[in-house]
Structures are given as C-alpha cells and as structure tokens.
C-alpha cells in the first residue's frame, strides 16, 4: 500500500492517475473538481478527502474507505462501490445513478437531493442517513 502521509493535491492526482490509486493512502487530500473517471480506487484510504464536484464516473471503489469525505455534487455514475465505507459522507446533490453500492455502509450520510436511479442498494447500511428529495426510481432495495 502506498502511504501518502503529507501528500498534496498534485502528488495525489499523479499517483492516482498512474495506477497507485488502488490501496493508496490519500487521507485528507483536497481533490475538488478532479477528473478521476474510470480509475481504480479500490481499497484506497480517502477518509476526510474533499472531493466536491469530482468526476468519478465508472470508478472502481470496492472496499474503499471514504469516511467523512465531502462528495457534494460529485458525478459517481456507474461506480462500483460494493462494501465501501461511506459513513458520515456529505453526498448532497451527487449522481450515483447506475452504481453498485451493495453492502456499502452509508450510515449517517447526507444523501439529500441525490440521484440514485437504477442503483443497487441491497444490504446497504443506512442507519441515521438522510435522503430528502433523493431520486430512487428503479433502485434495487
């Protein structure tokens, strides 16, 4: 596993885009608005990251740790987030349409105004999560 310790935005984006995203430690890095679409972030440590407005379409984030990450307005369409730890994330206004969140932990998440169309939400833990005005049309629950 790559340990970033005091990894800055530029270094983190370079490492993620060059294949070190999988199992990497990017705890607390500011990745606002970055294009991370289609990348492998499985098992990555992204706790407390600022990922507002990121384009993460089609990312592999299985088993990733995203506790308390800020994912407001992020494009997470068609992401594989099976078993991801998303406890306490702020995901207001994010688009998770078509994503696979099976067995993910969404406890205490703010999912207000999220697009969850056609999402796989089976066996998801959502204790304390809020979902006002979220669109769950066609979601597997």
Image: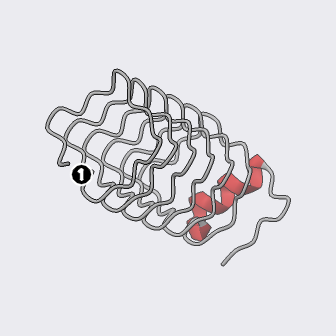
Q: Residue furthest bottom?
A: 1
Task: Give residue 102's position: percent from left, percent from top.
Answer: 30, 59
> In the shown orientation, is residue 52 left or right of residue 76?
right
Q: Residue furthest left?
A: 138
The residue located at (23%, 35%) in the rendering is: 117
The residue located at (62%, 45%) in the rendering is: 69
Where 101 falls versus 96 (above or below)? below
> Quarter of the image holding residue 30?
top right
Where 74 falls versus 80 (above or below)? above
Residue nearest the observer in this picture, 39 or 75: 75
Task: Give residue 45's position: percent from left, percent from top.
Answer: 63, 63
Q: Residue furthest right?
A: 6
- Under circle 1, the secondary element is loop
Circle 1 packing at 10 Å, graded few (<14), some (14-19), many (20+), is many
Task: Give residue 109's position: percent from left, percent from top.
Answer: 50, 41
Looking at the rendering, in which quadrant would you find the N terminus?
Answer: bottom right
Task: Give residue 71's position: percent from left, percent from top.
Answer: 55, 38
Where 101 falls versus 43 (above or below)? above
> In the shown orientation, is residue 99 left or right of residue 34?
left
Residue nearest the observer in this picture, 30 or 38: 30
> In the shown orientation, is residue 45 left or right of residue 53?
right
The residue located at (70%, 74%) in the rendering is: 2
Q: How is the image coloured?
A: secondary structure
Q: Which residue is mark 1?
A: 120
> In the shown orientation, is residue 79 left or right of residue 18?
left
**Badge count:** 1
């Amino acid at each position: 596993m790559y340990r970033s310790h005091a990894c800055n935005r530029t270094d983190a984006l370079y490492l993620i885009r060059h294949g070190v995203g999988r199992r990497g430690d990017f705890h607390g890095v500011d990745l606002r608005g970055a294009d991370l679409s289609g990348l492998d972030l499985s098992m990555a440590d992204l706790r407390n990251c600022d990922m507002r407005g990121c384009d993460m379409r089609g990312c592999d984030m299985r088993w990733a740790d995203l506790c308390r990450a800020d994912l407001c307005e992020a494009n997470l369409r068609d992401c594989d987030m099976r078993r991801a730890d998303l406890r306490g994330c702020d995901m207001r206004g994010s688009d998770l349409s078509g994503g696979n969140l099976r067995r993910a932990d969404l406890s205490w998440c703010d999912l207000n105004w999220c697009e969850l169309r056609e999402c796989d939400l089976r066996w998801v833990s959502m204790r304390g999560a809020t979902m006002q005005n979220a669109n769950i049309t066609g979601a597997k629950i």
